[in-house]
Image: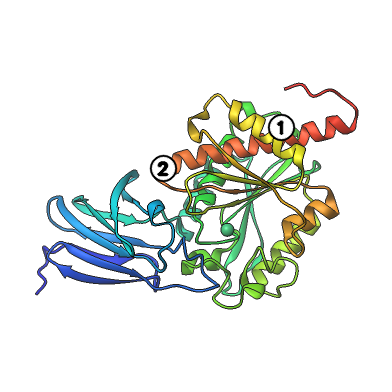
Amino acid sequence: MSTPDDINLRSEVPDTVTVEHRGEHEWRVTQRFLGDEHDNNHNVTWLRIRNPGPETPIRVEVIWAEFRYMADRGFGYLKHGDAWATVRGETTPTSTVYEFTAPAGDSLFGTFPWYGIEDESRFIETICARSTLYSVRSIGRTGEGRPINCLCIGDESKPSFVVLARMHAAESAGSWAVEGAAEYLLGDEARPLLEQYRFHLFISVNPDGVANGIKLTRMGPVEEYDMVRGGMTSADPTIVALREELFSLQPACLISHHSYLWSVPFLGVFERQVGLDMLDYLVNDDDLGNTGAWLVRFTGAERGFLRWECYSRFDTTVAFTELPWHHRLPDTISGQGVDILKATLAAHQHKLRARRGEMYVR
Ligand SMILES: [Zn+2]
């Protein structure tokens, strides 16, 4: 029997999990997606807790879709109002059990922070209201008819600098990284950059995936609906729109943010010197507190991937990341977004200077 005073738990993102009420203040949440088209280590699990009474201890067990790397699955996130907190869970071989206090009123809880379509709208509205330097445009429509929004800032006649988040829509960290970059570009330090580049920032380049809480643009074969693997070949409207946009912009720099389960942030590059310069920047950064260590991969040819095509066709300086949650808070990820933007710029400018035969000066 449920009474109006009972705490209620339900999924905030439709169809991603099954929620069972197991006891008075106890729930079991089972992830529903498993397979090639899903990021099985990064399934969206985001719940709304409605607590009409006073704060109350509750127990939530999350059964993961798959069970590798259980040691990396011990964190949960609670959002109440605008405040974020991490929650330590106890892992079993197949699940993580979280015991925490549900605040009075509404709060949100999950295995990693979720950033939805409405969060993007709110951010775009806020930043455009704050500064007329930003404009917003849509590069096309998704399969489900959503606009693919791009925030633009900087001199229109100058080379393009593109930052992408959510090609894999389930990997929410990228949206906060782009928010961080967008805020940074409004600051005094970034003023000269706006005279040298036009920045094109995509908070959610895969809005259908974000709306449906999945990795791809829609469920189905990865060659058709994975924005990375299907970049050059897919006929999906979202992927076609991004391909045409990148080929038209021929960006000087391209950053693509991703997120994985493991604890150490990852940086991928095609050019060795770019990777070394970025690392030099990242590990010397004054506010190193953001991360402390990076895993770098010097990647070979990635045929069929848009980032590789940009590098090989337009000499684009490319960096792609995995920004793991792993107890980090959204503000930290936003800081990493700024660090990566600055590191990519430093590496790109060094590349141009080196070609002119100039010495590298930090
Ligand atoms: Zn990814």
Q: Type of residue at label 1?
A: Ala
Give left or right: position of 227 versus 57: right
Q: Position of residue 251 (x, y in %)?
A: 77, 49
Using a 10 Å C-alpha cutoff, classify the residue at mark 2 as few (fewer than 14 neighbours), some (14 to 19) or many (20 or more). Answer: some
Q: Secondary structure at mark 1?
A: helix
Residue designated by label 1: 346
**Is residue 24 left or right of 274 when viewed as pictured?**
left
Q: Is residue 199 left or right of residue 26?
A: right
Q: Compare residues 262 and 226 and report the one nearer the observer.
A: 262
Quarter of the rendering occupied by the C terminus? top right
Image quadrant holding the N terminus, namely bottom left
The amino acid sitting under disc 2 is Leu
> Looking at this view, is 143 or 156 the one in front?
143
Horizontally, residue 116 falls left or right of residue 104, namely right
Tell me which corner region of the image, top left, top right, bottom left or bottom right, holds residue 6: bottom left
Ligand 1 within 8 Å, label 1 CB: no
Give the colour scheme of this rendering.
rainbow
Q: Quadrant of ligand 1?
A: bottom right
SS label for mark 2:
loop
Q: Is residue 222 above or below residue 95?
A: below
Residue 66: image x %, image y %?
42, 67
- The location of residue 112, given as percent across then percent down, is 40, 54
- Residue wearing tag 2: 329
> Which residue is painted at 35% across and 44% down in the image?
82
